[in-house]
Image: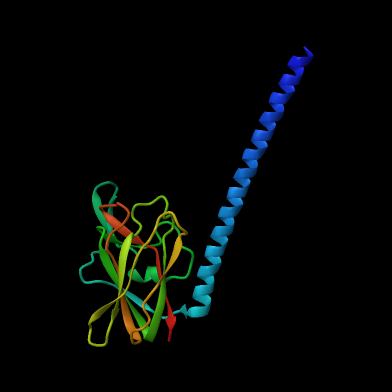
Amino acid sequence: MKDDLLQTLYEKANLISWVDSGNFRLEQECCNRMQHLSLALAREKYFVRNKSSYIEGCIAVKGSDTTEWGGHVGLWGILPLWFAAPPPHTILALRNPTPSDCWPFRGSTGEVIIHFPRKATITSIGLEHIRPDTTRSAPNHFIVYGILDNGTRINAAEGVYQYNKPAKQYFSLDNNNSPLQSIVFRVLSNHGNPKYTCLYRVHVYGVT
């Protein structure tokens, strides 16, 4: 009986040691992950704060080949009533986005043109979606064009908005070009929604 008791205590001690070791590894992994995310967020904030500033007073209009996404409801189930989608300038708002506080357009490709109050050297954009990890309507692959005085478009950036990263993601733009009066933000694909794409926030940063 003494040997059996010692064997039982030995097995329990090993189990407790294994559980404690597993918890320690899990806590250590979580700490490392949180530290990584904190450093990444600090780098993004530093980049925006020290390299450029948010350009205020912009105007956003839809591209000529882009159709806004609307819908309709029925009045007492008989007469259809159409309602308009939120306007393009919704993407420029500084408030925190909430569900449906976005500018939607039909399909998975489309563009919005952002005009600045004065010429600026654009350094980056901030692209934000409310829940990139759960929605298929978020933009995926996109390209940014700068518009020259003669109307010519020049490539300024190309990127991918990733669903498994923070809701607001920053992308650097080529600032070796002359100051611009406007840029075009063109979505080339979304994350799988065939009917519409939602743009919640597109913030432009630069030097004026």
The residue sitting at the top extreme is 1
Q: Residue at x 32, y 81 (%)?
A: 182
Is residue 208 depicted above or below 62 in this figure? below
The residue sitting at the left extreme is 65
Q: Residue at x 30, y 51 (%)?
A: 192
- Residue 34: image location, x then y, percent: 58, 55
Is 176 situated left or right of 168 in this image? left
In-front residue for pair 14/31: 14
Q: Residue at x 68, y 34 (%)?
A: 17
Residue 81, located in which quarter of the rendered image?
A: bottom left
Question: Count the marks: how many?
Answer: 0
The residue sitting at the right extreme is 2
Q: Residue at x 53, y 70 (%)?
A: 45
In-front residue for pair 113/39: 39
Is 129 situated left or right of 107 in this image? right
In-front residue for pair 99/146: 146
- Residue 86: image location, x then y, percent: 35, 64
Where the N terminus falls, by quadrant?
A: top right
Is residue 146 depicted above or below 36 in this figure? below
- Residue 166: image location, x then y, percent: 47, 59
Q: Give the image's coloring scheme.
A: rainbow
- Residue 114: image location, x then y, percent: 33, 76
Is residue 184 depicted above or below 101 in this figure? below
Residue 145, located in which quarter of the rendered image?
A: bottom left
Where the C terminus falls, by quadrant?
A: bottom left
